[in-house]
């Protein structure tokens, strides 16, 4: 027969003797709302030794909770410090990448008047825990009251101190909730239950060490009931579960759990999840509610949190009014539940067995066998502390997807009471046994000591036993079935996910104590092996399978933050046994790469900054107002020629392109040929042509044209870096027309790259962009010059500098058109101001199919910059410049993204889906830069200082974030 607690009773003659419900009620009441059934079971526990070894979680099993582990203020803190269950990234895909995005607020607050601030609760328990540790040490060594009344008086004083601290923290909440004082509403009730009178030190001598610990645990649990938040518990850290993981993965609403247990009577929260019920009777002792709460208790700001709080529950109670059951009722219940549920939790068993042979008969019965292909069965291992040595006959023709669950303590050590699989075998019909047929391959462990559960009366209690290990596993399976519903048709694959992602404990590999190991909820929701994932490339006609090693495992190397939208995913797939597969959503940015790839660390990044901002103080005409900062050395002398034209040349170090191979010479150049009157000129060169083709003398630094940092025509900057040519013509004495073109080609250099980078980017096309610019400048008066220009840039297989590892994403490239307007004004006394603003529109090629395309209307982007320059600050020839820039920022627009994903969440069918995704570029990127330069040694040398600060915006490119300062000293001979 099956039975509650460890109490043995004789039931109907046809039933089997010696069965036991796999859970233990604490030998002292856990909270004030203890049911009569619990009290009866607890009092009877001492009489059950003849029938079954009693479970004794206290003294030996409870002591680690306050001595070595200290779960309430130390290494395994169930509330706040080390578990960190309520904040931080939840990374169910690959640990450190945000696989499922979205804002997650895992703390659900209830309206509790007077509840303390949540961020103060953790430190309170740490402080009170230290007080309790000191009190406990005294209590443990006090001996009898008669032998040491003085020490008990001191213990009573310490206890009153704990009461006072607790009242200060929780008094308002207790009074608001109970309508009376902290003492009457909370403290006195708990003292009475444990027989404690703080004013009578002799009463303290009656408590055993187990009861002392139990008292403090109840003190903690009771006060946390007034916190206005759900309770965290030690098991959460042990199995890598947080409520935020459930929020991002799914809360189980598409899963159905079967509960083979006592009736849930008084917990309305859990009853709300029960959609079907049958059974032998309505008898209950609270055990069923405790088990169910770990699986489906609501995240509602109070009490226990279930792993799958929205899952539906179908329940069957196999126990009669005596609390016993037999195999016939068990079989009927399993048949009913398996016909409706994807996972069935069975926290019951018979003494002396981890898995008894009669279970094979249950699974072979016609009503159950018909459902074996759609149900996972989770069974508690039992609480006898035995290792199974008996082999059992197994009906392999009706082989269920079964997991047997043992218990571990919070350190991951097998509980003393937990049954173990040993080397017992599930024999074939001929009596043969192979290694893979051993019970240990169907065995996992989960926390089962002093687990916080529902008491079925609206409160909480702590219970111990494998009964409470099993539902942690069942809840994990429910999460799997909720996110991947088609796994219901492949229960063996679901079991394999659980066992293959479990943490190995004990002897390496599967062993006879821990089986496959400790359940890991997060790992079960993640790919078993990243390297085995595949994704599908869509070519417009059919999907083509690609290995996941062509996708970044991190996104820290590319400044693709503009594409980090919560809605932009591509999907990878994990192959499972039986032909199933699971899909995982990965941010699209993981498949994108821009023009930034630095491989030698911070020092090289700093050198890159020096290269990009290598400036010269140039006094072109002997007057400080004409001096300027520029990347080009413009002091080159005119070159005589037979044509009588003005020919001049200038050189400068080429801007750094770390991570890319350098083509051609290491210097950029410019050659200008002009008529003697300088009304018409032609310029050709190689390098940062945007600086010279832009026609803005006030902005002579390429950083102003860089789309990542600058605000002066970054559209033209996208195509700047290679060969360029242009012409300018003076229309009259005040107006000049310019026209020019430029191109840029980048090929990645892998000589200093890691093996990972080499493998990830080897198939990325060379980056190539080309553009034209038409501009006009007009001098309004001696002080003011206005300008305007039109720019058109085409990028091959890229979009705003970003490429994809999938050539079909951006294979046909994009076109960006921009309009730039500027104003230069001389304020007098060597002070001038220059402004620029650019508006751009980006579109992908018309009529060209690619997976990632800009929607109709294009992407609207803006950029702007203002610079103040002052000549003659400390001397006649020095000059300073202060600029503030808004780099290119996408203001609006959307992308059409075709991706291969699951199109039917019930069957797992995949297909192409085109989604329209709004592009969100985050905060507007703002930078400020300061430059100072002064000639020395009568112009033979230069001294300069510089600094750049990022004021706003985020960047995954560490080069373009934070602060950089430096200086330079140059001499010529």
Image (cartoon, rainbow, N blue to C red):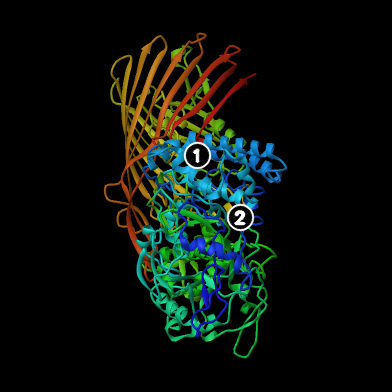
Which comes sooner in the sequence, label 1 or label 2? 1
Residue at 65% over, 59% down: 413
Task: Estimate the spatial distance between the alpha carbons at disc 1 and disc 2, rounded to whole Å.
Answer: 22 Å
To which quarter of the image does residue 892 belong? top left
Residue 474 location in percent, x, y?
A: 48, 66
In the rendered view, does 463 fall on the left or right side of 870?
right
Q: Which mark is residue 584?
A: none
To which quarter of the image does residue 18 belong? bottom right
Residue 356 location in percent, x, y?
A: 58, 79
Q: Which mark is residue 410?
A: 2
Residue at 41% over, 76% down: 280
Q: In the image as oriented, which residue stretches furthest toward the bottom?
A: 430
| 189 w.r.t. 783: above or below | below
| 306 w.r.t. 197: above or below | below
Quarter containing the C terminus: top right
Residue 682 location in percent, x, y?
A: 40, 32
In the rendered view, does 910 fall on the left or right side of 631?
left
Camera-nearest residue between 36 and 662: 36
SS at badge 1: helix
Camera-nearest residue between 509 and 312: 312
Camera-nearest residue between 762 and 254: 254
Q: In the image as oriented, which residue stretches furthest toward the front?
A: 146
Residue 883 location in percent, x, y?
A: 43, 24
- Residue 615 visible here: yes
SS at badge 2: loop
Q: How many marks?
A: 2
Which residue has dot 1 on it?
A: 121
Camera-nearest residue between 624 and 906: 906
């Amino acid at each position: 027969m099956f039975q509650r607690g460890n109490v043995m009773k004789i039931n109907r003659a046809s039933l089997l003797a010696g069965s036991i419900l796999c859970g233990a009620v604490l030998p002292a009441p856990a909270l004030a709302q203890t049911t009569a059934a619990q009290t009866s079971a607890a009092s009877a526990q001492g009489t059950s030794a003849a029938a079954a070894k009693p479970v004794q979680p206290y003294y030996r099993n409870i002591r680690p909770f306050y001595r070595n582990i200290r779960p309430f203020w130390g290494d395994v803190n169930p509330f706040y410090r080390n578990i960190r269950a309520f904040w931080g990234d939840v990374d169910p895909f690959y640990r450190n990448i945000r696989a499922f995005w979205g804002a997650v607020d895992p703390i659900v607050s209830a309206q509790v008047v007077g509840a303390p601030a949540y961020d103060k609760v953790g430190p309170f328990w740490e402080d009170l825990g230290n007080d309790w540790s000191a009190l406990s040490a005294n209590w443990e060594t006090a001996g009898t009251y008669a032998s040491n009344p003085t020490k008990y008086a001191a213990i009573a004083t310490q206890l009153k101190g704990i009461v006072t601290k607790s009242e200060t923290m929780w008094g308002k909440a207790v009074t608001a909730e109970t309508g009376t004082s902290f003492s009457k509403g909370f403290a006195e009730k708990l003292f009475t239950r444990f027989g404690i009178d703080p004013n009578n030190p002799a009463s303290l001598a009656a408590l055993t060490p187990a009861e002392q610990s139990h008292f403090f645990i109840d003190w903690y649990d009771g006060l946390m009931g007034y916190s206005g938040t759900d309770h965290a518990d030690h098991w959460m850290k042990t199995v890598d579960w947080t409520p935020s993981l459930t929020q991002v993965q799914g809360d189980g609403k598409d899963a159905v759990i079967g509960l083979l247990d006592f009736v849930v009577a008084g917990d309305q929260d859990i009853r709300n999840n029960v959609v079907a019920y049958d059974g032998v009777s309505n008898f209950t002792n609270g055990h069923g509610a405790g088990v169910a709460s770990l699986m489906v208790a609501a995240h509602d700001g109070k009490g226990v949190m279930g792993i799958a709080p929205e899952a539906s529950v179908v329940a069957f109670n196999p126990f009669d009014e005596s609390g016993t059951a037999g195999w016939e009722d068990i079989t009927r219940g399993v048949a009913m539940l398996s016909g409706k549920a994807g996972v069935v939790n069975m926290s019951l068993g018979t003494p002396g067995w981890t898995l008894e042979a009669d279970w094979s008969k249950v699974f072979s019965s016609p009503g159950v066998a018909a459902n074996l292909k759609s149900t996972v069965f989770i069974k508690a291992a039992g609480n006898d502390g035995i290792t199974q040595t008996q082999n059992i006959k197994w009906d392999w023709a009706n082989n269920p997807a079964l997991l047997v669950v043992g218990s571990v303590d919070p350190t991951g050590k097998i509980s003393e009471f937990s049954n173990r699989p040993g080397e017992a075998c599930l024999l074939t019909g001929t009596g043969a046994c192979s290694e893979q047929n051993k019970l240990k391959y169907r065995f996992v462990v989960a926390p089962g000591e002093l687990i916080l559960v529902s008491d079925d009366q609206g409160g909480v209690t702590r219970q111990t036993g494998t009964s409470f290990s099993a539902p942690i596993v069942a809840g994990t399976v429910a999460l799997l079935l909720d996110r991947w519903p088609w796994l219901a048709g492949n229960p063996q694959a679901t079991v394999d996910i659980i066992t293959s992602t479990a943490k190995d404990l004990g002897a390496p590999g599967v062993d006879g104590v821990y089986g496959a190991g400790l359940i890991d909820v997060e790992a079960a929701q993640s790919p078993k092996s990243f390297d085995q994932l595949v994704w599908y490339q869509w070519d417009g006609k059919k999907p083509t399978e690609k290995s996941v090693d062509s996708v970044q495992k991190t996104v820290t190397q590319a400044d693709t933050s503009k594409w980090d939208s919560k809605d932009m995913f591509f999907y990878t797939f994990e192959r499972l046994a039986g032909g199933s597969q699971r899909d995982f959503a990965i941010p699209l940015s993981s498949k994108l790469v821009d023009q930034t790839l630095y491989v030698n660390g911070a020092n090289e990044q700093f050198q890159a900054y020096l290269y990009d901002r290598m400036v010269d103080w140039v006094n072109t005409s002997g007057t400080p107002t004409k001096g300027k900062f520029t990347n080009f050395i413009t002091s080159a002398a005119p070159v005589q020629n037979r044509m009588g034209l003005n020919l001049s040349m200038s050189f400068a170090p080429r801007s750094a392109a770390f991570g890319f191979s350098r083509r051609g010479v290491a210097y950029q150049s410019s050659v200008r040929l002009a008529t003697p009157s300088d009304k018409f000129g032609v310029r050709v060169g190689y390098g940062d042509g945007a600086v010279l083709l832009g026609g803005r003398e006030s902005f002579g630094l390429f950083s102003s044209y860089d789309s990542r940092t600058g605000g002066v025509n970054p559209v033209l900057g996208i195509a700047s870096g290679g060969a360029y040519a242009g012409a300018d013509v003076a229309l009259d004495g005040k107006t000049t027309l310019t026209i020019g073109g430029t191109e840029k080609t980048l090929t990645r250099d892998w000589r200093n790259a890691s093996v990972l980078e080499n493998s990830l980017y080897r198939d990325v096309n060379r980056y190539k962009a080309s553009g034209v610019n038409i501009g006009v400048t007009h001098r309004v008066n001696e002080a003011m010059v206005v300008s305007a220009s039109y720019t058109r840039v085409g990028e091959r297989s890229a979009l705003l500098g970003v490429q994809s590892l999938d050539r079909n994403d951006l294979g046909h490239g994009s076109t960006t058109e921009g309009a730039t307007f500027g104003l230069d004004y001389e304020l007098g006394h060597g002070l001038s101001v220059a402004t620029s603003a650019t508006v751009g529109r980006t579109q992908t090629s018309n009529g060209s199919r690619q997976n990632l395309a800009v929607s109709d209307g294009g992407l609207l982007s803006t950029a702007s910059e203002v610079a103040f320059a002052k000549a003659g600050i400390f001397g006649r020839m020095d000059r300073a410049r202060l600029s503030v820039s808004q780099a290119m920022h996408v203001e609006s627009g959307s992308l059409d993204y075709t991706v291969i994903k699951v199109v039917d969440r019930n069957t797992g069918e995949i297909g192409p889906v085109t989604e329209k995704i709004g592009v969100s570029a985050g905060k507007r990127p703002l930078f400020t830069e300061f430059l100072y330069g002064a000639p020395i040694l009568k112009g033979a040398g230069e001294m300069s200082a510089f600094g750049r600060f990022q004021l706003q915006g985020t960047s995954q490119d560490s080069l373009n974030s934070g602060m950089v300062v430096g200086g330079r000293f140059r001499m010529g001979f």
